[in-house]
Amino acid sequence: MEKVRMYISNWLDRQDSSWRALSLERQRRYTRFLFLAYLLLTAVIIFQLWCDAARSDSGIAIEHIDSPVPKRESPALPPDTKPNY
């Protein structure tokens, strides 16, 4: 586990030093590009959700949920009678 932690730490240090080696203009350009990509992805997801909501019918179907466990019928009592205790 210590080797993995050291490997990740060294990798992050190398990435940080290569980022700092870039000029400020290039850092700004990469940051701007990543922000615009994030903004575009967010807009696409919101548009997709909006289209899905517009297409769906506004009625909610309320139905009985069946249990995945099969029911075993009790042979002692019929299902519609209650025991008298």
Image (cartoon, rainbow, N blue to C red):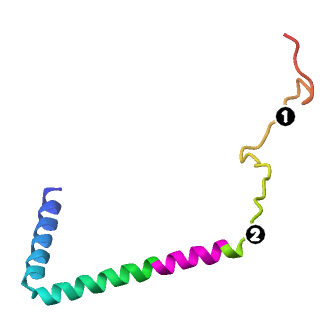
Quarter of the rendering containing residue 48:
bottom right
User: Magenta span has 48?
Assistant: yes
Pick the front one: 68 or 50: 50
Numbered disc 1: secondary structure: loop
Q: Residue visible at 90% across and 30% down?
A: 79
Mark 1–mark 2 CB contact (< 8 Å): no
Numbered disc 2: secondary structure: loop
Quadrant placement of the N terminus: bottom left
Q: Residue visible at 55% across and 79% down?
A: 47
Pick the front one: 73 or 60: 60
Quarter of the rendering containing residue 55:
bottom right
Provide residue 78's location: percent of width, then percent of height: 92, 28
Few, some or many residues within 10 Å of mark 2 (<14, 14–19, 20+): few
Read off the residue under disc 1.
73
Mark 1 or mark 2: which is in front?
Answer: 2
User: Magenta span has 52?
Assistant: yes
Q: Residue visible at 90% across and 24% down?
A: 77
Amino acid type, callout 1: Glu
Please provide the residue range marked out in magenta: 43-53
From mark 1 to mark 2, how far is it between C-alphas?
39 Å
Q: Which mark is residue 29?
A: none
Read off the residue under disc 2.
57
Q: Residue visible at 10% across and 69% down?
A: 10
